[in-house]
Image: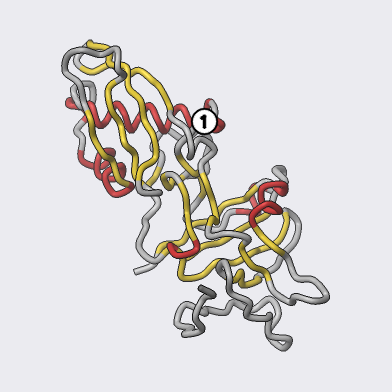
Amino acid sequence: MTYDFFRKERENIFNQRFNIPTSINNYYVLKSNTVFQAKKYNGTKTFTVTVNNQKQKLIASVVNNNSLGVKSDPTVTSNRINVIITESDMANIFKSTSVSNRNKSMNYQIAKRLCQDHATSSASSLLISGCIVNNFAQSVAYPGCKLSLKLKSRQPFENPFASGNEKEYFLIGRVLDTDCQVIQYLGKTNESLNELVNPFGCKIPRPKSSFNKKIDFSGSKIPRPA
């Protein structure tokens, strides 16, 4: 089963990660394996949560590209924690933690704080925000480059603390081309394109008779360069 993920990327970031067609190279292609990356992917995030009326200072970072490693700050001497939280864990935490247990659950308080902090400062976030439906028509006020992914197995989890009417979904850390069955560029804010993006190292030209049509190359046997 695949999962849809839509995100509008800032144009300068898009240009850093994607090559667009030229008179010589008639294809869109990634410049590396990275499609999306959290702004704090290479760093750590220090924050405090309160569980059972006790404050706990924590440090979080991305592990294995798509999970969170959370441990107690070195200054904490008792009740130390060291946990790995996956994307599916995040979804389950919000779904299964009862209201009466939320103030007692360390994992719930961690998940809540990280989601809420993203809205305050995405620059210090370990999460990547987006949607699971194409609602770009409702966000024309925000310029950027529209991208659509079909993820092979990673499932975005909902942010239950999102403000406004649009539902927000997150992925953790970084999205690679190998996570995707299909990557499509839908154009800038006011454009309506439907262009296949080649994974890093792949140079399949755009079919001249099929511009702007959705093409799935997930079953292609063309090897990537060594």
Relative placement, left or right, of 2 versus 32 is: left
The amino acid on which the numbered mark 1 sits, given as a three-letter code, is Ala
In the rendered view, tell whether residue 223 sits above or below residue 106: below
Residue drawn at 50 percent across, 35 percent down: 40
Quadrant housing residue 56: top left
Task: Residue 148: give x, y in percent of width and height.
Answer: 56, 61
Question: Which one is in front, 142 or 72?
Answer: 72
Residue drawn at 64 percent across, 64 percent down: 185
Relative placement, left or right, of 203 versus 163 is: right
Residue drawn at 43 percent across, 62 percent down: 179
Quadrant housing residue 94: top left
Relative placement, left or right, of 216 versus 63 is: right
Residue drawn at 68 percent across, 80 percent down: 206
Task: Residue 204: give x, y in percent of width and height.
Answer: 62, 80
The coloring applied to the image is secondary structure
Instruction: List the residue tagged with mark 1.
Output: 119
Task: Residue 6: give x, y in percent of width and height.
Answer: 54, 56
Label 1: which secondary element? helix
Quadrant housing residue 112: top left
Task: Residue 198: give x, y in percent of width and height.
Answer: 59, 71
Task: Report the number of numbered marks.
Answer: 1
